[in-house]
Amino acid sequence: MRFGVVTFPGTTGEADAVHALTFLGHEADYVWHRADVDLSGYDAIVLPGGFSYGDYLRPGALAARSPIMDAVAAFAQAGKPVIGIGNGFQILCEAGLLPGVLVKNRDGAPVSKYVTVRVEDHVSEWLSAVTGSTLSLPLACEAGNFLADEEELGRLWLNRQIVLVYSEEDGTTAPAGSAPTGSMNDIAGVSNEVGNVLGLMVHPERATDGLSGSTDGALFFSIICACIEEALS
């Protein structure tokens, strides 16, 4: 499969994403946000983590208005898969391709550590993991606090758009919540209604080859590749 990894000024996770995808046997190209606006040659698009435009105004706000985001929106509207990781999640929310908003962490401090997330019953095309199972993945963010109004939050659960929630190691939720970011309902990842666009604060691309202590991240890329291969066969 051929992935396009979109980069902006301030993106820092593009090399991790390209490494993870090539390690898993796929092609991955860096796609500069201004020079490359034709995405037709790609099977899937990744918006990696970092601090696009230095998080000026709000994290992801300026990148969401970059010329390439019209092409990303068209790519998603055509039913093709798009994943936003960390800052990429923030960009997709700011661009209106995903619901909700991501703001400063509850304690106002960055978080950088491995966390446990629980897989929910979801509609996303990206994740091949059993509902209720847990994954160990890196988290690194300063603005990973997911917020939505109560009506929208209820709609997300009803539509099975909540993909991941922070949990304890045994999959339970702490009485005061398990999200180190303070996210509502401990939400760590959401999708659009049809499931082809996914945003998550944890970093699966940093947990594919086992060098960081986990290979759970590989589960995020295997199912979508299988789906694409089946569609092309």
Image (cartoon, rainbow, N blue to C red):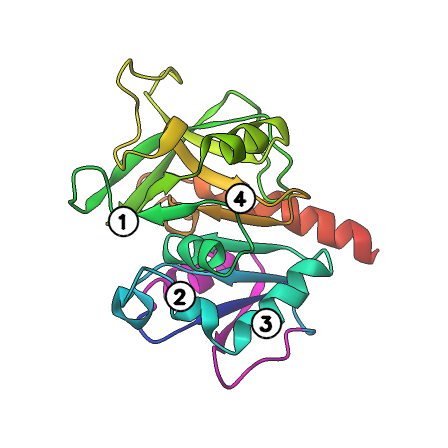
- In front of the other: 113 or 20: 113
For numbered disc 1, what is the local secondary structure? Answer: strand
Looking at the image, can residue 43 be seen?
no
Q: Which of pointers 2 and 4 lies earlier in the amino acid sequence?
A: 2
Q: Which mark is in front, 2 or 1?
A: 1
Give the residue pinned by disc 4.
220
Give the residue pinned by disc 2.
14
Q: Tell me the kind of residue under disc 1.
A: Cys
For numbered disc 3, what is the local secondary structure? Answer: helix
- Residue 29 numbered mark, or none: none
Compared across the picture, whether 60 is left or right of 190 comes to left
- Quarter of the image for residue 138 reads top left
Q: Which of pointers 2 and 3 lies earlier in the amino acid sequence?
A: 2
Residue 230 locus on image (x, y percent): 79, 50
Q: CA distance from mark 3 to mark 1?
A: 26 Å
- Residue 70 numbered mark, or none: 3
Q: CA distance from mark 2 to mark 3?
A: 20 Å
Q: Tell me the kind of residue under disc 4.
A: Phe
- Quarter of the image for residue 167 reads top left
Give the residue pinned by disc 1.
141
Callout 4 crowding tier (Cα within 10 Å): few <14, some 14–19, many ≥20: some
Residue 142 locus on image (x, y percent): 23, 49
Q: Is residue 35 above or below residue 85?
A: below
Magenta-span inclusion, residue 45: no
